[in-house]
Image: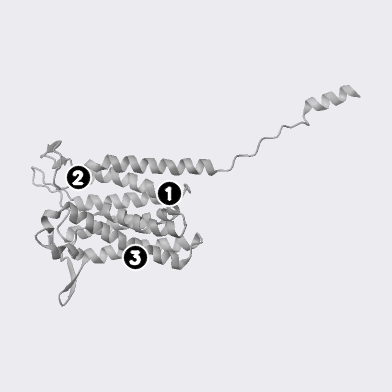
Amino acid sequence: MTFGFLQLDPVVFELGPLQVRWYGVLMALSVALGSYYLLRRGKRLGYDEDFLYNLLLLSVLGGVIGARAVYVATNWEHYAQNLVAVIRTDWGGLSFHGAVIGGVLAGGLYIKKKKASFNELADLAVPGFTLGIMLVRLANILNMEVMGRMTTGGFRHPAQLYGSAIGLVLLIIYVLQSRRRPPAGYLFWSFALYYSILRGVIEETCRDNPLYVTAFIYEPWGMAGFTLVQLLTPLFVAFSWWMRRRTLQSAALQAPAPPPRRRNNTGKGDRRRKGRNK
């Protein structure tokens, strides 16, 4: 791929028929960094190390399977003629929504079995998700995928950079919110809420994706709607907002009631009454 004056190759190196691509390297890096954060913070919260390793393994496997399954299902016309390509995740083609759903389902079932706190552990997974968005979107540039729409002036929206910037914004939001020590689950559902809004409004509007409902097309600016993600965005936003609200309500119910204020019975009135009785 030619990018300005740089010659960028999506392949890092080859080992016989196996190609190691930047897409896989950056995805693995985001998983490693996110896992390190979850392990470190999870142990501080008192979780057993073996439990955390098992949770990470199941969540990552579930995430990869979910990401590929959703992407293939929504692009079946491309894979129907080449079934071998279905398992070639190193060529790209992963759905972030599928990754979250698959990872949450696999990890959530294991957490439930071990009777641990889903909300508490889900909060610790957010940095890994944001890093995944940032790094994998950069890898999309090398793979020449997730392309932006063209404007009438010949400018193509850098949709990959828009997506990567969204990941950075979400990471900043996470850091700022975590300083306030919100109730368990608030950080995860805030991430889901803001990601749904930012991707649906910014990235998908400028991304060259098929339109399932043609509501508007403004070719001079290279903007259009609605893609499948945009059609599902109101559902994602409503569900995330409702779940985040539930975390606040649960925290309010569990908060200890303040002790009753005691009346001061040794004030001036008492001293005056004592004076009169002398």
Q: Amino acid at mark 1?
A: Gly
Check disc 1 and report its element: helix, strand or loop.
loop
Q: Earlier in the sequence, mark 1 or mark 3?
A: 3
Q: Position of residue 221 (x, y in %)?
A: 14, 40
Report which residue position mark 1 lands on: 185
Give the quarter of the figure containing the N terminus: bottom left
Q: Position of residue 249 (x, y in %)?
A: 47, 40
Report which residue position mark 2 lands on: 228
Q: Amino acid at mark 2?
A: Leu
Quarter of the rendering containing residue 102:
bottom left
Report which residue position mark 3 lands on: 32
- The single residue placed furthest to the front in the displayed view is 113
Q: Earlier in the sequence, mark 2 or mark 3?
A: 3
Q: Amino acid at mark 3?
A: Ala
Would you say 67 lies left or right of 82 here?
right
| Disc 1 versus disc 3: nearer the observer | 1
Q: Earlier in the sequence, mark 1 or mark 2?
A: 1
User: Image height check: is 47 above or below 262?
Assistant: below
